[in-house]
Image (tube, rainbow, N blue to C red):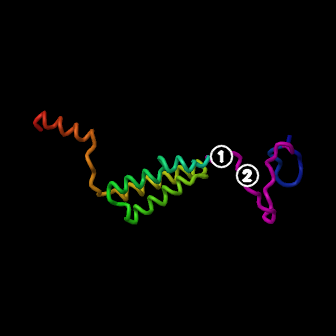
Amino acid sequence: MPKPGPGRPRRRCEECRPPEKRRADAPPLSPPAPTNVHRLPAPSAESVARAGPVGATLERLTNAGRESTPEGEIALTLAAALAEGGHTASGLAALAKELRATLAAALEGAPVEPDLVDELKERRARRRGA
């Protein structure tokens, strides 16, 4: 029940009132510490040398003759950073996405060697007389 007194009557009781606002000169609240940051294990040197992103990226760039272009160099640098490991999951995803985009830019306009699927499509088209 609202208390009588000067000014406007209370709309809420003492227990239900909203929390007090912070003073302008009060120290700022510190941000909460991250609770679930997981680090991915770094790949071993053996696995990187065998089938790592650097080797795969270099192979694709070499086959297209684009390993010495600026985009090719950036792609190799990104692949090396990706192979280095020690990234968070979101950092790893961002690095992989940027590597994919850079590799696509580096290989843009490069001659593409036909693969088995392309050969089969061509044979089928010849048989059908198209």
- Give the magenta part as a residue range: 13-40
Quarter occupied by the C terminus: top left
Marker disc for residue 88: none
Q: Is residue 10 magenta?
A: no
Residue at (64% x, 48% y) in the render: 39
Q: Is residue 28 magenta?
A: yes
In this view, the mark in front (1 or 2): 1
Three-letter code for the amino acid on which mark 1 is drawn: His
The secondary element bearing badge 2 is classed as loop
The secondary element bearing badge 1 is classed as loop
Mark 1 to mark 2: distance in Å? 14 Å
Residue at (22% x, 40% y) in the render: 119
Specify whether 16 is left or right of 79. right
Residue at (62% x, 46% y) in the render: 41
Closer to us: 36 or 77: 77
Marker disc for residue 38: 1
Q: Quadrant of residue 29?
A: bottom right
Residue 58 % position (x, y)? 41, 55
Q: Disc 2 designates what residue?
A: 33
Is most of the magenta stretch helix, strand or loop?
A: loop
Three-letter code for the amino acid on which mark 2 is drawn: Ala
Closer to us: 24 or 33: 33
Residue 100 % position (x, y)? 43, 52
N-terminal of the pair, mark 1 or mark 2, is 2
